[in-house]
Amino acid sequence: MLTTLLLFALASSSAGSVSASPTPVAVVAPTAAQTPEEGPADKRPEVKELLDTLKAHTDKRGEEDREAITVVDKLLQEFPQSGPKDRADIVKGLGKCFELKRQDLEDGVKNNQLFLACAVALGEMGADATKTLDKYIGNKKLRQDVALQRQLILSLGKTKDPAATKRLIDLLNDDDHVLVGATAETLANFSGAEQKLRKELFNELLKLMMTTKTAKDADANDIVAREKWDVIAAPIITTLQALSGHDERKPEEWQRWWNKNKKEDWDAED
């Protein structure tokens, strides 16, 4: 049976991987490996065995990447019941996969199923995975794989780690519209963050939206501005709604709402 991660990776790779698609959430079974008093068990032999098995598969230069993705899925299931040392080892083991070399498939299609699966899994690992995801966003060896870069960005936001927001704000200035759109989309994951942070993210997204709209409206022949608007407008509006708990549709209406409410308490009950 194909794992959730494998199905996702294959679908993303075959579709070109730049279209918006929801990131699957792995279903992790409850564990009896620890009690609340003891905390998660650590340095468990099963984690080491899985990491060794992952390395054995990935050393086959792509011939056993399907089997490797199955192991990635199992490591994801082990993660919630692992102690800090095992968690660090799991994140490190998945991160090492991005260092592997894989030849492109026919017609230049990226052979990136394993990389995509690791990126998805790391997104489910919270702040433990922030630095690893950040490391490979914009990595010169992986920069041309837009599908992977997009997933790394989506996963960085999914960690919901406030420490990741500085990098995500920077990514709103990326030259690739697809990656900017992914950044706008994933910032919605911070809808439960402290209000100060939500307002900062809201402001950055609003400025981007209004600047892009101005450029588009100023020159009907500016194809680049039009393409950028078409890619980023919808995810920005969706994320503005998530961050503020308010619903507007038009950019000008969002600007007016912000001018009126930027100093108000967004969480106050009516």
Image (cartoon, grey):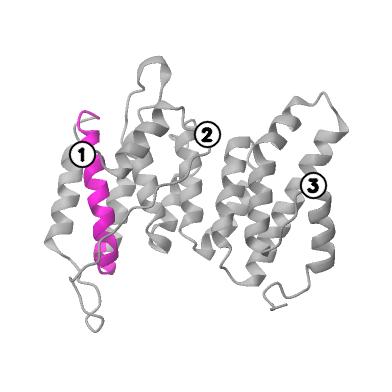
Image quadrant holding the N terminus, namely top left
Say which mark, if any, is on residue 240: none
| Magenta stretch, overall SS | helix
* Residue 97 versus residue 47 in the image, above or below: above
Residue under label 1, please give it.
1
Give the mark nearest the N terminus, 1 or 2. 1
Give the mark nearest the N terminus, 3 or 1. 1
Q: Which is more toward the observer, 131 or 197?
A: 197
Magenta stretch: includes residue 65? yes
Q: Which residues are magenta?
A: 62-86
Residue under label 3, please give it.
210
Which kind of residue does numbered mark 1 sit on?
Met
Residue 176 in view, yes or no: no
Nearer to us: label 3 or label 1:
1
Residue 171 in view, yes or no: yes
SS at mark 2? loop
Give the mark nearest the N terminus, 3 or 2. 2
SS at mark 1? loop
* Residue 163 versus residue 208 in the image, above or below: below
Residue beneath the point at 42% across and 33% down:
12
Labels 3 & 1 near each other (Cβ < 8 A): no
Residue beneath the point at 24% across and 35% down:
66
Which kind of residue does numbered mark 3 sit on?
Met
- Mark 1 to mark 2 CA distance (whole Å): 26 Å
The picture places residue 51, in percent across and down from the top left corner, at: 19, 51
